[in-house]
């Protein structure tokens, strides 16, 4: 189980390197949850908040959906659960607002909407 910040800023190179590392592990199950530094995984906010801040000079421009798709040798959880060997594991990258990173909610109403 890897819970958050498997990259510094969600670049395709970082995601691919992490996925390659996961693929080399002998474990039957590999469960991953993004963290606030994995900004390309926050598809709702990447283009409007994070592209310019973290990847303005990237040529060609980073496609967040394509980058997210590079993580394939695991079970990725984003506000969902999976049952492994009888254990239900729920994963959510969302946290309270902190310095404008990915997957932040602003208030209790947003939190309730995410987790209800």
Image (cartoon, grey):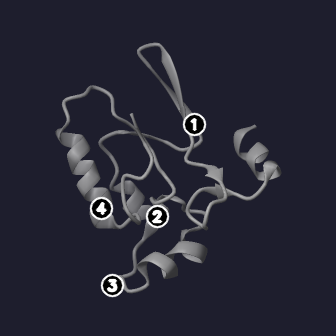
Q: Residue at position x 46%, y 60% from top?
A: 37
Q: Position of residue 53 (x, y in %)?
A: 50, 79
Mark 1 and 3 residues: CB-CB less than 8 Å, in contact?
Answer: no
Q: Which mark is residue 59?
A: 3
Position of residue 47 relative to residue 16, above or below, is below
Q: CA distance from mark 2 to mark 1?
A: 18 Å
Left or right, 50 with reference to 107: left
How packed is label 1: few (under 14 Cα within 10 Å), some, or many (20 or more)?
A: few
Left or right, 67 with reference to 22: right
Q: Position of residue 52 (x, y in %)?
A: 50, 82
Q: Which mark is residue 80?
A: 1
Q: Residue at position x 34%, y 39% from top?
A: 74
Q: Residue at position x 29%, y 42% from top?
A: 73
Q: CA distance from mark 4 to mark 1?
A: 24 Å
Q: Which residue does the numbered mark 2 point to in the structure image?
A: 40
Mark 2 and 3 residues: CB-CB less than 8 Å, in contact?
Answer: no
For marks 2 and 4 on the same chain, the one whose residue lies earlier in the sequence? 4
Front residue of 52 and 101:
101
Q: Residue at position x 20%, y 35% from top?
A: 25
Q: Which residue does the numbered mark 4 point to in the structure image?
A: 14
For marks 2 and 1 on the same chain, the one whose residue lies earlier in the sequence? 2
Can you tell which of label 4 and label 1 is closer to the viewer?
A: 4
For marks 2 and 3 on the same chain, the one whose residue lies earlier in the sequence? 2
Q: CA distance from mark 4 to mark 3?
A: 16 Å
Q: Position of residue 26 (x, y in %)?
A: 19, 30
For marks 1 and 3 on the same chain, the one whose residue lies earlier in the sequence? 3
Mark 2 and 1 residues: CB-CB less than 8 Å, in contact?
Answer: no
């Amino acid at each position: 189980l890897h819970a958050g910040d498997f990259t510094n800023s969600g670049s395709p190179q970082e995601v691919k390197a992490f996925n390659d590392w996961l693929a080399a592990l002998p474990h039957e199950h590999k469960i991953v949850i993004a963290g606030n530094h994995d900004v390309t995984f926050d598809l709702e906010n990447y283009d409007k908040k994070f592209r310019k801040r973290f990847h303005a000079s990237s040529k060609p421009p980073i496609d967040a959906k394509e980058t997210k798709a590079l993580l394939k040798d695991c079970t990725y959880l984003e506000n969902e659960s999976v049952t492994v060997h009888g254990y239900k594991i729920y994963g959510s990258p969302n946290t309270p607002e902190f310095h404008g990173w990915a997957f932040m909610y602003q208030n209790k109403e947003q939190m309730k909407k995410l987790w209800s």
